[in-house]
Amino acid sequence: MSPVRIDDNQGSCLLYRDLHGQKPETVVEAQGSYLYLDDGRKILDACAGAAVASIGHGDQRVIQAVAAQMTTLSYHHTSRLTNPAAERLGRMLVGHRPGGLSHAIFLSSGSEANESAIKLARQYYVELGEPDRVHIISRNNSYHGNSIGCVSLTGIPSRRRHFEPILMTHMSRVSPCYPYRYKHEEESDEDYAERLGAELEEEILRVGEGKVAAFFAETVGGAAAGNLTPVPGYFKAIRRVCDKYGVLLILDEIMCGMGRTGKMHAWEWEGVVPDIQTIGKGLNGGYQALSAVLIQQSVVDVLARGSGAFANGQTFQCHPAAAAAGIAVLSIFESDSVVATCAKRVEQLRQALIDQLGDHPNVGDIRGRGLFLSIEFVADRKTKATFPKDLPLAAMLDNAIFQRGVSVYSGFGKGTADGVVGDHILFSPPLNISSQEIAELVTAVKAGIEDVF
Ligand code: PLP
């Protein structure tokens, strides 16, 4: 066979996300909070690549830890073997049993973690002797991943559109907690939370008692509608309903977990603990591909008493290099007090956004928790009217802010059967972003917004 000759001047062979647009810009290097492009531009990564780069880019401590692990053991299969890195990371995450979570499975992406959580809930009920529990309830304006199971959970019509006929049928969705648009004017937070709890109860009864296996929710909503943040008491109301009907509570903290909200787990703000939790992204800061499912002892016990195995083996699970990156990142969280220090930046970012943009006629809402904040834009602040569907406002804002040297995460506004959402931009910078970088971020965002309006 003749050697393959590669001509770098040939056109690209990659299937880009946007087949109509131009070739995406090329990033060649990243350090700290910045991305460096091949044309010499320096971009402040204000979304940490979708809440991934939790300790910033290029940290030598993580790179050295991964290199050392690769030198010692780069891969093994888990059918009969385990490895010290995955064991240690498991102990770091659940060895102290946060909220009773006692076991971890490591996978490579958030979608795989959520897919595994769906399967775990199903197998749990089969082994418990309740095989009729096949239904899962999730929420509108939610995002849970890219695989068929995860798209079936996801409440974003554009993500579902092409696949609707092949999505899982025993799934349904209820309203998210979205006070800016759906809490009635006269309603207290408590009453709103109870109303949403009652809606979940109604849906469980509609499906049929003993038919629902799990309720699936992002603790703080991420990309789907721009940081939908629960009102106080929301998850307590949800937990009460789940407990009443024996429904597992699965919290997706792929985006909002691992320190992002100012606590290690976002559920710590809510006073509830999930039966199953998924994490990813910031878990090892993107230095390797890694996600995890964290599981309550009570769930593990049922499988242990039953078949004795979770039917969910994957080739790359518990990957030693990915686990080594996780250990290094969590060690840096501790040595650099990352989560505690980020609390100061949270107030700075939130206050600066409010001070500089709070009065803007098209800024409808500034919301979120921790270093996980969004701005929702509206055509009219009084009526909360969204912009026309054919105006790609989110993309225009994203682009204008990028031209000003800052990368944000944007989402389109939509008015669909799933409810109205305004165009929004999301900030989820590295948790160790500096005060000066936050000031730079807000100045550039303000300028970008002014370029558009
Ligand atoms: N769940 C949430 C809340 C997410 O934000 C994402 C990704 O953005 C996923 C799941 C899917 O994760 P991944 O893209 O790693 O498969």
Image: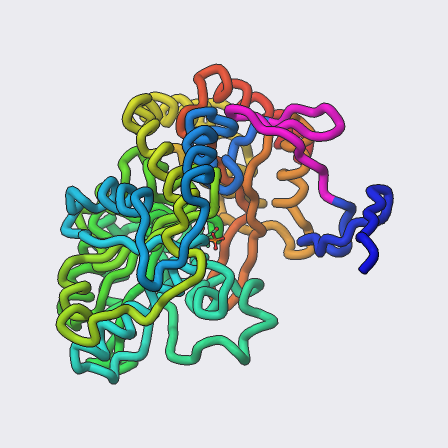
Q: Quadrant of the C terminus?
A: top right
Q: Nearer the viewer, residue 120 or 339?
A: 120
Kindly tell me whether residue 439 is visible in this rendering.
yes
Establish if 4 lies above or below 132. Answer: above
**Magenta residues, start to end:** 24-43
In this picture, is 167 found above or below 108?
A: below
Q: Is residue 325 left or right of residue 298?
A: right
Residue 72 in the image, given as x and y percentages of width and height: 41, 39
Q: Is residue 266 visible?
A: no
Residue drawn 23% across the image and 57% down it: 295
Rendered location of residue 73, percent (x, y): 42, 44
Left or right of 377 in this view: 176? left
In which image quadrant can residue 110 be found? bottom left
| Residue 315 placement (x, y as % from top left) | 44, 61
Colouring rule applied to residues: rainbow
- Identify which residue, 404 or 350, lies in the foreground: 404
In the picture, measured across the screen, residue 256 lies left or right of residue 128, that is right
Tell me which residue sits at (26%, 79%) in the image: 133
Q: Residue furthest front?
A: 1
State the count of labels: 0
Q: Was residue 298 drawn as part of the magenta stretch in this picture?
A: no
Task: Please report the residue visible at 53 percent of the width from the left and 49 percent of the height from the top.
Answer: 422
Relative to 349, residue 377 above or below: below
Pick the residue in front: 125 or 4: 4
